[in-house]
Amino acid sequence: MGEELKVIVFALGQEEYGIEVDKVRTIERMQPITRVPKTPTFIKGVINLRGIVIPVLDLRGRFGLNETEPTENSRIIIVAANEMEVGFIVDSANDVIDIDSDTIDSPPEVVGGIQAKYLQGIAKIGDKRLLVMLNLSEVLNKNEIMQLEQLEV
């Protein structure tokens, strides 16, 4: 048996994704986002969360998927990565589950149009469920981090 991982499960379209709980600060309902000029379209802007300004990315746009209008189920998942906090807009945040690290396989080159570099692996849950585990350091690679840090100023 491998290590037990606690994972937040969220959805983008029909696909389910996971982020380790220890990287997630909070999950928030959608709220007004202040647009910041001269940023890529997937960087939606910033929010003021309890006095802290947090950059917000649309994960659909980040992965090159079609962006959609937020719904009642849309959430902003606040993650801590590289000593900064960033919000990810997702279609819904469904669940917290435990998975065995031994059930995580290397990702294929592309999953649902998303490049493997953004993925840590694919976790098999039961017989039919697959969970795409995110590689946060790639989702927030140096180019994006530099742009996000400029937003915080």
Image (tube, rainbow, N blue to C red):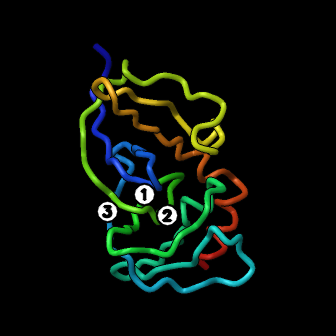
> What is the x, y in percent for residue 52?
42, 77
Q: Earlier in the sequence, mark 1 or mark 3?
A: 3
Q: Are marks 2 and 1 in contact (CB under 8 Å)?
A: yes
Residue at 31% in and 29% down: 125
Q: Spatial distance from mark 2 to mark 1, Cα to Cα? A: 5 Å
Residue that carries the numbered disc 3 in the rendered image: 26
Q: Earlier in the sequence, mark 2 or mark 3?
A: 3
Residue type, mark 3 in image: Thr
The quarter of the displayed image where residue 49 is located: bottom left
> What is the x, y in percent for residue 43?
62, 70
The quarter of the displayed image where residue 24 is located: bottom left
Q: Are marks 1 and 3 in contact (CB under 8 Å)?
A: no
Residue at 46% in and 55% down: 12
Residue that carries the numbered disc 2 in the rendered image: 86
Residue 79 marker: 1
Q: Is residue 97 left or right of residue 64?
A: left
Residue at 31% in and 62% down: 26
Residue 56 marker: none
